[in-house]
Image (cartoon, rainbow, N blue to C red):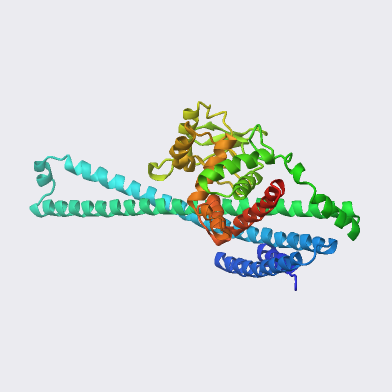
Amino acid sequence: MKFSLQRAFVAVFLVAFLLPQFGMALTPQQERDALEEELKRIEEEIAQFEGSIAETQARQRTLQNQIATIQSQIRKLDLEIQRSNILIQDLSGQIQDTSASIENTERGIEQTKEQLGELLQKIYQESQKPLLEVVLSGPTISDFFDNVAALQIVNGRNRELLEQFQDLTRYLVSQKESLEGEKTEQQNYARIQLLQQQQSRNAQVEQQRILNITRGQESEYQKLLADRQKQAQEIRSRIFELFGVPDAPTFGEALEIAKHVSVQTGVRPALLLAVLTQESNLGKNVGQCYLTNAQTAVGVNIRTGAVVRNVMKPMGLAGRKGDVDDFLIITRELGRDPFQTPVSCPIPSVGGYGGAMGPAQFIPTTWMAYRNRLAAMLGRPADPWRITDAFWAAALYLGDYGAKQQTYSGEWRAAMIYFSGSTNPAYRFYGDSVMAIAERYQKDIDALEGY
């Protein structure tokens, strides 16, 4: 199998750096076409590595095969990261184009408003004149009719400008909605890239760990495998990492919560644990921001003290509610101080919005959609920052979108919708990663329960 990661980097380097320096600057469309071509090549190589990994894993578990598998995973993740870079770069161009278009539209609106103001002032001045003054304003009767005709023309122009103003305003709203969607998409790619980078680091650490323990000897590796098979009881002491939760449960405790919730919702415990793990892994920044100004959605990073914009989505276009409104309702209902309650920060590299709450990383508007169902099941208002309530909320959401089927496709679809509200194949890394984590958790559960 040919491996052309170097070629991929060279191509992107040429597009981004060298060609503009040699007077061969690309148009935005040419640059996007080049990015699309590079993206296609990278995706083909990712597919090749997926086949290689599956083939290696199917062989006998030897040290050589294990190291080969990890190395293939690392190379595949490198390509995934490169793919995410291209998608983020492409969206950056689209966002710049949309932002420029919005600025032009806003200028057009301001110009139209000025013209409207001048015409309305003229019409008003004419309307204040007494009829006799209007009739006698010209030396002949024909001058009077000329003035009437001119006023009618002014009124007609006024209507045209008003319609133009309304059209521009509607177009501006659609442009801003488009920009909002592009920024959300870019943020999703950035979140996936964080997962890819973390998994790549973990794979490299695992490779080095195996080599350190075995010193490259097959016999030592087989001993390591045997030791791993005896670690079922130790799994109970593993901390189930949920950032932003003061008293994170052990794996055994988290499993008991997940099993109890599963009985009521039909969502497999391993999947529920996997989704919550994935969300917390996204989340080295989970629970690291406070909202400080509800009107502007400005906040502060708890650790650094830095001012953070767009801690959560403010009031939307045309007066639609944003996350801030619902966040204030949720915290008030729970008796929490909204300005001392931690939420996720925006991703610094791309901006967007933060505001996700607790281990399950629900944004306020989504939590509100489940608030009444949760309260009915729990017999009290649900708290996004309470670990048991986070399990319940995540299970209800996953169950609504296919996880109750307990099939790979149903669970994968539910995980994808949990991430972005869609099954956009561009985000498949998230769903694939959740299912891989769920498979590992299922093995842990089986070991604990003696299967």
Q: How many marks?
A: 0
**Whole-percent x and y of residue 320?**
40, 42
Question: Residue at (42%, 50%) from the top-left corner?
Answer: 106
**Whole-percent x and y of residue 406?**
55, 55
Residue 96 visible in the snapshot? no
Relative to the observer, which residue lies in front, 102 or 442?
Answer: 442
Question: Residue at (83%, 53%) from the top-left corner?
Answer: 226
Relative to the observer, which residue lies in front, 192 or 179?
Answer: 192
Question: Residue at (52%, 40%) from the top-left corner?
Answer: 312
Outermost residue to the front: 450
**Whole-percent x and y of residue 449?**
69, 47
Is the N terminus in the top left, top right, bottom left or bottom right quadrant?
bottom right
**Whole-percent x and y of residue 321?**
42, 40
On screen, 14 above or below 255?
Answer: below
On screen, 157 above or below 345?
Answer: below
Residue 344 visible in the snapshot? yes
Relative to the observer, which residue lies in front, 307 or 50?
Answer: 50
On screen, 356 above or below 143?
Answer: above
Side (left or right) of 436 relative to 374 = right
